[in-house]
Amino acid sequence: MRLSTYTLLSAPHSVRIGAQLDGRMLDLVAGEHALNDGKQIIPASMKGLLALGEVGLARARAVLDYAEKNAAKLDKTTLAPDADVHYLPPIPDADKFLCVGKNYRTHLEELKRNDLIKEMPGEPTGFVKLNSCLTGHGADVPRPKTVTRLDYEPEMVFVLGKRAYEVSGDNPLQYIAGITLLNDLTCRDTQKAEVASGSRFWTSKNAPSFGPLGPCIITMDEVPDPYNIWVTCSVNGVQRMRVNTSEQIWKLPRIIPHFSRLLDLQPGDMFSTGAPGGVAVGKADAESLYVKPGDVIECAFEAPHMILRNRIVAP
């Protein structure tokens, strides 16, 4: 399944959770009402759905199966054309959105060349992405007036579907409901100053809309191997990066026990798994590659295919 949080352009004040179906979006709550089998368990939020565990995902699949067989019976708000869908972050209200930094050797090398790291990590390291910086697929991203070096970072994100606290690295995929995409937009001007002062990227990565996320959570039944996914990034239709997730240094068997030793991880919490090498700051012509108003950034998984598209605009 491909699960989204969204509103309709025709009904912008009602936030819904849905599943993609043949180029349309199924409202899972309304779809469950249409199923009319005496059960009403799907909540109004993605975090609430994930908190139900496999029971919730199985119910969503049942509603999706019903809609596929009975699409003609559903109105255009229950099964909406994609053109009417305004995507929000799939989980706009995660309790914890943890980002594993310095997780590709090629990215480590380019950060070191540009004085953006002080040390080579011996274990997973991280920072936090704030909910207030998140935005959805298709949204415009204002570049602040003081920012001239705005960089892109396409990252695979794991979405938790099960509580994890003080757990081992055995069978780590049991805790994962699905994956999604983050463009971890970063102000390199500010980041360099933050590194020099010893802080952890708080402001350089958390300005409003610096966290495009989505458009969907791809559930794990559609992900044969999360560590064999080609991740790409294009600007204005020109591909600038293509890297495989197999190149990550720290994978789930280390990430889950590392963070769960002190943090009580809950369904709906997220781990972004780090930027690959190839971002603008690592290039000799970086100044010409930083994104500016008018640029359109597309981060993508090649398979399972998904595109996260956003345009940079003036503030």
Image (tube, helix red, strand yellow):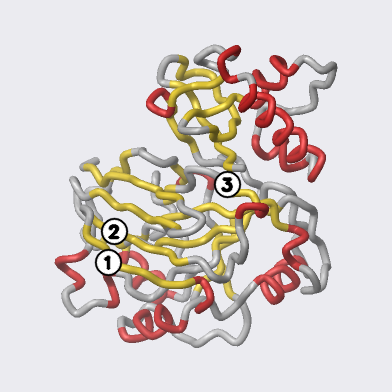
* x 78%, y 58%: residue: 264
Q: Position of residue 210 (x, y in %)?
A: 39, 51
Which amino acid type is shown beneath numbered disc 2? Ser
Residue 311 falls left or right of residue 16 = left
For the C terminus, the quadrant is top left
- Crowd around label 2: few <14 · some 14–19 · many ≥20 (10 Å): some
Alpha carbons under labels 2 and 1: distance apart: 5 Å
Q: Are marks 3 and 2 in contact (CB under 8 Å)?
A: no
Q: Are marks 2 and 1 in contact (CB under 8 Å)?
A: yes
Alpha carbons under labels 3 and 1: distance apart: 24 Å
Question: For residue 217, which numbered disc appears in the image?
Answer: 3
Q: Are marks 3 and 1 in contact (CB under 8 Å)?
A: no
Q: Nearer the viewer, residue 86 or 187?
A: 86
Question: Which residue is the extreme one toward the front?
Answer: 69
Indicate which disc, 3 or 1, sits on the residue closer to the N terminus.
3
Query: Quadrant location of residue 165?
Result: bottom right
Q: Position of residue 302 (x, y in %)?
A: 43, 59
- Crowd around label 3: few <14 · some 14–19 · many ≥20 (10 Å): many
Residue 255 falls left or right of residue 150 = right
* x 21%, y 42%: residue: 314
* x 34%, y 81%: residue: 110
Indicate which disc, 3 or 2, sits on the residue closer to the N terminus.
3
Which amino acid type is shown beneath numbered disc 3? Ile
Alpha carbons under labels 3 and 2: distance apart: 21 Å
The residue identified by callout 1 is 240
Which amino acid type is shown beneath numbered disc 1? Arg
Question: For residue 234, which numbered disc appears in the image?
Answer: 2
User: In the structure shown, which secondary structural element does the residue marked by tag 1 occupy?
Assistant: strand
